[in-house]
Amino acid sequence: MKTRELQLTLQVWAQQQWGEHAPSIFTLRAWARSGKIYPMPKKVGRIYFVRPNAEYIRNINSLVHRMREVEDDE
């Protein structure tokens, strides 16, 4: 049986990443919609859930570069 990985809400994830300097929920939702959080958060109802190891990606090109590096290593 496959176990599911624990998912965090955007606010909890941001608190763990940045502490008291976490962005507002409005900013976090905008990042989720625009693909700036990888892996992409999942929306359930009105709440976004994200993996604990997710990262904020400022520049989407840097994500593409990272993905290509992983492919080259394999």
Image (spheres, rainbow, N blue to C red):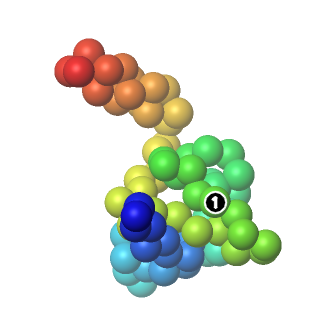
Farthest residue, direction front: 1
Is residue 18 something one can see in this rendering?
A: no
Quadrant for the C terminus, please. top left
Residue at the spot 58% in from the left edge and 68% down from the top edge: 49
Residue at the spot 65% in from the left edge and 68% down from the top edge: 48
Across and down, in percent, residue 39 comes to: 49, 49
Residue 39 vs 12, above or below: the answer is above
Farthest residue, direction right: 45
Across and down, in percent, residue 70 comes to: 29, 26
Across and down, in percent, residue 66 comes to: 35, 29
Q: Along the horizontal axis of the image, is 8 left or right of 53?
A: right
Farthest residue, direction bottom: 20
Q: Which of 40 and 27 is in front in this view?
A: 40
Residue 38 vs 1, above or below: the answer is above
Q: What element carries label 1?
A: strand
Farthest residue, direction top: 72
Q: Nearer the viewer, residue 52 or 5?
A: 5
The residue under label 1 is which amino acid type? Answer: Lys
Is residue 11 something one can see in this rendering?
A: yes
Across and down, in percent, residue 32 comes to: 64, 55
Mark 1 surroundings: few (<14), some (14-19) or many (≥20) residues within 10 A: some
Residue at the spot 62% in from the left edge and 54% down from the top edge: 31
Q: Which of 25 and 6 is in front in this view?
A: 6
Q: How many marks?
A: 1
Q: Mark 1 points at which residue?
A: 42
Quadrant for the N terminus, please. bottom left
Residue at the spot 20% in from the left edge and 21% down from the top edge: 73
